[in-house]
Amino acid sequence: MKNDTPQTDQTNQNNTSEPLNHHPSDSTPTPEKDQKKRNTIIIVTATIIVIVAIAITLTAFLLMREKPNDSSSNSSSEGNSQQDDNDPIDYPEEGENNDPANETTQIDKIAAELYEKGNYLVEGRWAYGSACDFIPHLDGDSIREIRVRPLETSTIDGEEYYKTTLPYQETIDKHFGETFTGDALNRFVAHRYVDIDGVLYCSDRGGATFTTIKNLKVSLQAEINGSYEYLASYNVTSGSEGEETTPEAYTDKFTIQKTGETYKISSIDSLTYNDHFAS
């Protein structure tokens, strides 16, 4: 028995000293498993981001489809308002729903301004040294010479006209066509300016006493087919500074009508009074 016991202890000792051989379990972290988890998290996060982006895009699209209906009506009303604000102010026309008092005041003001300018042109065409000198005066350059050199003339109905360097129609429209139209314009240029091959020829006659008007008043006499007939009353001043004023009032009948977007004088009796200078 003494010999058996030591053997058993030796065996146990050997078993105790023998190292244990452990196998890694599935729950033990490894680099491969960590990478796999990271990849899974990235994929899930990316998927969520894509879903959210799609949801935002769809929501915005639906809102945009509904919004134009409201905005279009708003923009339409705003556009109409802006169009009304920006439309050019037109003069009153016959039959429009305007306050008659305002309409009359507007037309009267236009008529007075036109008559004052028209009377100045009627008087000036005869009062300056010649019709050739009147146009440079209207341009603000009285000493400018518009006649060609050497002088060239043409005689029409016994009246001598000088050739100028200016085109006829453009010059007449610029200086007189903005005030007169129709018969008034034709009578205004008669005996003063002629058109020969598109070139302006002017009369050398003139030198009458230049007068201007003062205390102008206009009164509407009749309205016929969009034309307004007026009676003008005024005093006359004469002299270089207009220092002499006649006490009596002169009268003149004239008519204005709308041509395009503006009113112009279509007839004026004072042209008849001045026609004797051409005879």
Image (cartoon, grey):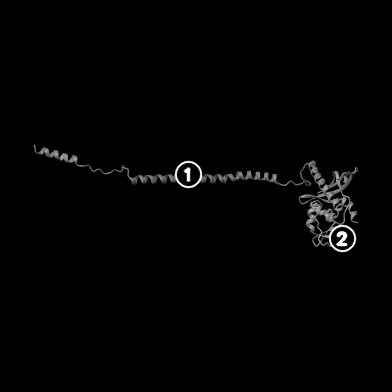
Amino acid under label 2? Glu
Q: Position of residue 255 (x, y in %)?
A: 84, 49
Q: Nearer the viewer, residue 185 or 209?
A: 209
Q: Nearer the viewer, residue 39 or 31?
A: 31
Please identify the quadrant where the N terminus is shown: top left
Residue 162 in the figure: left or right of residue 77: right
Disc on the earlier residue, 1 or 2: 1
Q: Nearer the viewer, residue 96 or 24?
A: 24
- Residues at marks 1 and 2 touching, judged by CB atoms closer than 8 Å: no
Q: Position of residue 117 (x, y in %)?
A: 82, 48
Q: CA distance from mark 1 to mark 2?
A: 93 Å
Which residue bears the numbered disc 1?
Answer: 52
Q: Position of residue 151 (x, y in %)?
A: 83, 61
At 53% from the left and 45% from the top, the residue drawn is 60
Amino acid under label 1? Val
Which residue bears the numbered disc 2?
Answer: 160
